[in-house]
């Protein structure tokens, strides 16, 4: 049985999204900037429709607040560097958290090398940051707050609306990385009150290599890629029409089915959590118990075993999962998120992330629940640390 449980890393492309992409590889191949002939104008009109569709999906008041990018990382980099550079005269202080994606953290570190000051807020044992913490960190020089909507490793959903209110009160720009949240909870930029929001198509069954940055009108952000006039001159490059078409379609479907999908994911998630707890001793659920947890994320630490060894043995049984975040694997450092919620290194090392999707079935969940306990037991039997515990 082949079971894919790494939907926080990427998702399978939806058939409808692929179908929506195909015409832009075949018939409508024009450059959207070429207005003097039909195939160019057709591309331009199609692009406008896609922008309109994406704006509608996240309830952006204006179509021109949607800027297409080449990925979620790009959208995050742009939001942080662009806002920092454009507002430099006002101040040099940025607030974020210790559990952001590396697209945010490494960008902040880069800015620190260039004269900016960054506050990395602590989170509690479940991964939550509070609006009060954010408010206490604001100084006269604060120009940007960037805090993720939902964490990609442990599934914590942050109080974004309340943080946005704090930011607004102090007239500080607020960006949120909503890459993991989209498709798993309702995202309405107007209701959330955010100034900027990033998303990435491949996390909600769209194609890889395409993302979006929402920039509320009036927010000053430096241009990202200098060149032609695409994306209102802010992000030059001939548009990836097929990719954008796939993203717009996948987003439409995700938004339309949000209630049904979150309910299904939650059911699969809770079945996994229950099954693992009942069958494996010395385990710890990382992230919130239920309230405030993303509907599709499961993250456990198993004492006395290594995450990498669990992944290898799961793979031998046809199960795809992850230990920490995919971007960080290949490094021996334990996940910065697990360290931030207070796990000791040796326990952070034995962590496993299982992330489901609307396509995950009960049979697949039960197969994982059957397969995982003997794997953990076998690894523990080989561990000298476990020997003493058993006795
Ligand atoms: C996946 C992810 C990104 C990066 O998106 P890409 O399109 O893969 O560059 C950024 N932030 C979070 C929270 C993510 O999960």
Image: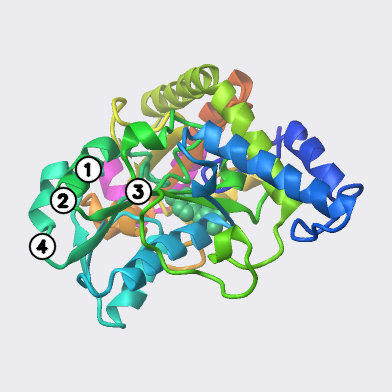
Whether pointer 1 and pointer 2 mark residues with C-beta atoms closer than 8 Å, the reply is: yes
Query: CB of mark 4 within 8 Å of CB of mark 2?
Result: no
In reply to whether residue 150 is colored magenta, the answer given is no
Q: Find disc 2 in the rendering and name its residue.
A: 134
The residue furthest front is 36
Mark closest to the chain's N terminus, 4 or 2 = 2
Q: CA distance from mark 4 to mark 1?
A: 15 Å
Location of mark 1 (residue): 163
Check whether the beta carbons of the residues at disc 4 and disc 3 lie within 8 A of each other: no
| Res. 240 visible in picture | yes
Residue at the spot 60% in from the left edge and 45% down from the top edge: 201
Which residues are the magenta region? 374-391
| Residue carrying label 4 | 139
Mark 2, Cα crowd under 10 Å, few <14 / some 14-19 / many 20+, is many
Q: Quadrant of residue 294?
A: top left
Q: Name the residue: 80% across, 60% down.
A: 34
Q: Earlier in the sequence, mark 1 or mark 2?
A: 2
Q: Secondary structure at mark 3?
A: loop
**Are circles 3 and 2 on residues that touch, CB within 8 Å?**
no
Circle 4 or circle 2, nearest the eye: 4
Going from N to C along the chain, the mark reached first, 4 or 3, is 4
Would the CB of label 4 be found within 8 Å of ligand 1? no
Q: Quick check: is 378 in the magenta stretch?
A: yes
In the rendered image, the vertical position of residue 275 relative to residue 124, given as above or below: above
Which residue is identified by label 3? 195
Chain-order first, disc 3 or disc 2: 2
Residue at image point 24% right, 75% down: 89
The kind of secondary structure element at disc 2 is helix
Q: What's the CA distance linking mark 1 and mark 3?
A: 12 Å
User: Distance from label 1 to label 2 (Cα)?
Assistant: 7 Å
């Amino acid at each position: 049985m082949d079971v894919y449980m790494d939907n926080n890393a990427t998702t399978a492309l939806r058939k409808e999204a692929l179908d929506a992409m195909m015409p832009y590889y075949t018939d409508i191949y024009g450059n959207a900037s070429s207005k003097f002939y039909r195939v160019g104008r057709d591309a331009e009109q199609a692009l406008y429709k896609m922008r309109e569709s994406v704006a509608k999906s996240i309830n952006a008041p204006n179509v021109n607040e949607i800027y297409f990018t080449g990925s979620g990382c790009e959208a995050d980099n742009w939001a942080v560097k662009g806002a920092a550079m454009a507002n430099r005269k006002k101040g040099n202080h940025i607030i974020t958290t210790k559990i952001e994606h590396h697209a945010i953290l490494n960008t902040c570190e880069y800015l620190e090398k260039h004269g900016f000051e960054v506050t990395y807020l602590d989170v509690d044992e479940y991964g939550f940051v509070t609006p009060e913490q954010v408010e206490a960190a604001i100084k006269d020089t604060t120009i940007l707050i960037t805090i993720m909507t939902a964490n990609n490793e442990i599934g914590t959903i942050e109080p974004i609306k309340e943080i946005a209110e704090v930011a607004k009160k102090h007239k500080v720009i607020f960006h949120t990385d909503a890459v993991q949240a989209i498709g798993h909870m309702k995202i309405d930029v107007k209701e959330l009150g955010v100034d900027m929001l990033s998303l990435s198509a491949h996390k909600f069954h769209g194609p890889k290599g395409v993302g979006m940055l929402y920039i509320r009108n009036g927010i000053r952000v430096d241009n990202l890629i200098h060149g032609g006039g695409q994306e209102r001159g802010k992000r030059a490059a001939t548009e990836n029409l097929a990719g954008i078409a796939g993203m717009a379609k996948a987003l439409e479907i995700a938004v339309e089915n949000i209630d049904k999908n979150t309910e299904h994911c939650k059911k699969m998630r809770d079945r996994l959590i229950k099954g693992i707890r009942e069958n494996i001793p010395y385990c710890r659920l990382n992230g919130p118990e239920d309230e405030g947890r993303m509907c599709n994320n499961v993250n456990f630490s198993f004492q006395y075993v290594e995450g990498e060894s669990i992944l290898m043995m799961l793979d031998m049984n046809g199960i795809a999962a992850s230990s920490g975040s995919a971007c960080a694997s290949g490094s021996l450092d334990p996940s910065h998120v697990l360290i931030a919620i207070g796990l000791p290194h040796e326990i952070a090392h034995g962590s496993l992330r299982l992330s489901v999707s609307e396509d995950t079935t009960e049979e697949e969940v039960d197969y994982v629940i059957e397969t995982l306990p003997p794997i953990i037991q076998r690894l523990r039997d080989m561990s000298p640390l476990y020997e003493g515990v058993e006795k």
